[in-house]
């Protein structure tokens, strides 16, 4: 147990990671040594940043808290703090059930942790972060909250209404990141496409992306978590015309049958979804689409699932993830629907869907053999350098494994030629 050392453990999404990085910067400024997601935490203080989105994530967060509470019982830890989404939603219940935790903080109350350590929150550093990712890329959170009313989602209950960050504030942060060596940005938000409506009374994502793309040093911009309804079409023009905006879009569709889209309260129809994807591919040649699908939502019939499976086969998404519906109290589904799909059926449907996607991914990857791509190197491993193309977002997508015939450097770009392919990874050599 090392004095004045704090271990930060981040669970859940990259939006949580940004919160952890903001906290880490404040702790470092107050004289602490900080480790993030260390395999063997050694500090006298631990902070767990929790996720509360779906059942599996909540279970993982609770188990992590319990493991550190056990360490504290055995005097391996002096202080234990918990923050984030799970803590925001279940603070009273967690406090009663896990008394070993010194304090629970809501998602936006983590600044109080600084005061509880007897330190001061440094306002002049309020937008600075201690980046935990490799120094050449960073996540850029452009907003908080969500104004959508999807039936299954507890996020608006946790985060509150949508709140855009001012464009000038975001640009200033990007300039700091670029000056520190960041070359690649992942734009993130609960809903990218709503950006600006609350501050500027109009959708401003296209303008924001354009302004950030003008900042010297930023070579790749990748967009995550767009919402399909009322999509800002001007964004496609920016993607097409700006060379440092990757031809990549993460847009969660969740389902395709009109029956399920209505039950999920997605405010879009099947035909509108199909037309939207066609527009993406027509206006941005070679765009790679990442989407997420949900199976087992209440009222999903075998016919609904078959329709979804057919849609995935026909559309051939370059990237696709899936997860089973998780019943959440106080959501629209939790209040108005019975959780009527057995867990075994949910899992079976997800397995079938992902098996289909694996075959699609393999075929799409094999079609790249012989082609050349610009890649950025993330790290060196025993047999390969590990890189990514503009179509590969860190942590969620596949990678490009590059032979070690010559010395390569992390954070640098190289042109490589694809030599072979698997379902989710490509193999290449430097040209």
Image (tube, rainbow, N blue to C red):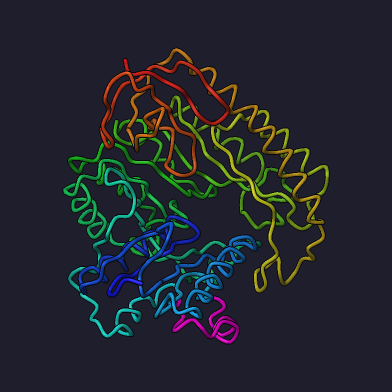
State whether residue 248 is above or below residue 365: below
Q: Nearer the viewer, residue 185 or 351?
A: 351
* Residue depicted at x 29% and y 25%: 414
User: Where does the image place residue 395, in percent across and percent down from the top left?
Assistant: 46, 44
Residue pictured at 61% horizontal, 36% vertical: 274
The quadrant the C terminus occupies is top left
- The answer to which image quadrant residue 149 occupies is bottom right
Q: Is residue 424 left or right of residue 36?
A: right
Closer to the camera in the image, 55 or 36: 36
Quarter of the rendering containing residue 183: top left
The span picked out in magenta is 89-106
The x and y percentages for residue 287 are: 46, 30
Based on the picture, tell me whether residue 99 belongs to the magenta stretch: yes
Residue at image x 43%, y 77%? 81
- In the displayed structure, 382 sits above or below 228; it is above
Q: Nearer the viewer, residue 370 or 186?
A: 370
17 vs 267, left or right, is left
- Residue 267 place in picture, x, y as percent: 61, 54
Residue 109: where, in percent of width, then height? 39, 78
The residue under the point 42% across, 58% down is 15
Which part of the image, by quadrant, shows the N terminus? bottom left
Q: Quadrant of residue 363?
A: top right
In the rendered image of this protein, does residue 91 appear above or below residue 247?
below
Q: How many marks?
A: 0
Is 428 placed left or right of 406 in the picture?
Answer: right
The residue lying furthest to the top in this view is 370
Q: Magenta stretch: residue 113 in it?
A: no
């Amino acid at each position: 147990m090392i004095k004045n050392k704090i271990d930060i453990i981040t669970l859940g999404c990259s939006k949580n990671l940004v919160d952890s990085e903001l906290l880490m910067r404040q702790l470092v400024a107050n004289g602490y040594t900080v480790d993030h997601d260390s395999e063997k935490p050694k500090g006298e203080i631990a902070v767990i940043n929790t996720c509360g989105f779906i059942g599996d994530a909540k279970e993982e967060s609770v188990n992590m808290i319990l493991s550190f509470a056990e360490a504290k019982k055995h005097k391996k830890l002096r202080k234990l703090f918990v923050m984030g989404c799970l803590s925001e939603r279940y603070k009273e219940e967690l406090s009663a059930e896990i008394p070993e935790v010194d304090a629970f903080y809501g998602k936006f109350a983590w600044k109080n942790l600084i005061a509880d350590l007897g330190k001061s929150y440094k306002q002049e550093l309020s937008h600075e972060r201690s980046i935990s990712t490799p120094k050449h890329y960073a996540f850029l959170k452009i907003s908080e909250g969500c104004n959508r009313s999807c039936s299954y989602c507890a996020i608006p209950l946790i985060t509150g209404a949508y709140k855009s960050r001012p464009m000038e504030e975001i640009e200033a942060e990007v300039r700091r990141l670029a000056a520190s060596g960041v070359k690649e940005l992942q734009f993130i938000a609960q809903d990218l496409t709503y950006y600006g409506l609350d501050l500027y009374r109009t959708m401003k994502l296209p303008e924001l992306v354009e302004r950030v793309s003008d900042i010297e040093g930023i070579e790749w911009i990748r967009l995550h978590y767009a919402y399909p309804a009322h999509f800002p079409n001007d964004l496609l023009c920016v993607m097409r015309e700006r060379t440092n905006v990757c031809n990549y879009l993460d847009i969660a569709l969740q389902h395709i049958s009109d029956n399920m889209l209505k039950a999920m309260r997605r405010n879009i129809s099947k035909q509108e979804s199909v037309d939207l994807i066609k527009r993406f591919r027509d206006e941005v040649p070679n765009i790679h689409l990442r989407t997420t699908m949900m199976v087992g939502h209440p009222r999903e019939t075998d016919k609904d699932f078959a329709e979804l499976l057919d849609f995935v086969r026909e559309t051939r998404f370059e990237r696709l993830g899936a997860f089973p519906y998780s019943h959440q109290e106080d959501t629209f589904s939790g209040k108005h629907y019975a959780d009527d799909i057995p867990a075994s059926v949910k899992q079976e449907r997800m397995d079938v869907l992902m098996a289909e996607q694996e075959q699609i991914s393999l075929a799409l990857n094999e079609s790249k053999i012989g082609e050349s791509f610009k890649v950025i190197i993330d790290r060196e491993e025993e047999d390969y350098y590990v890189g990514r193309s503009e179509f590969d977002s860190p942590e969620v997508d596949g990678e490009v494994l590059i032979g070690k015939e010559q010395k390569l450097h992390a954070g640098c770009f190289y042109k490589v030629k694809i030599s072979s392919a698997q379902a989710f990874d490509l193999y290449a050599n430097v040209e």
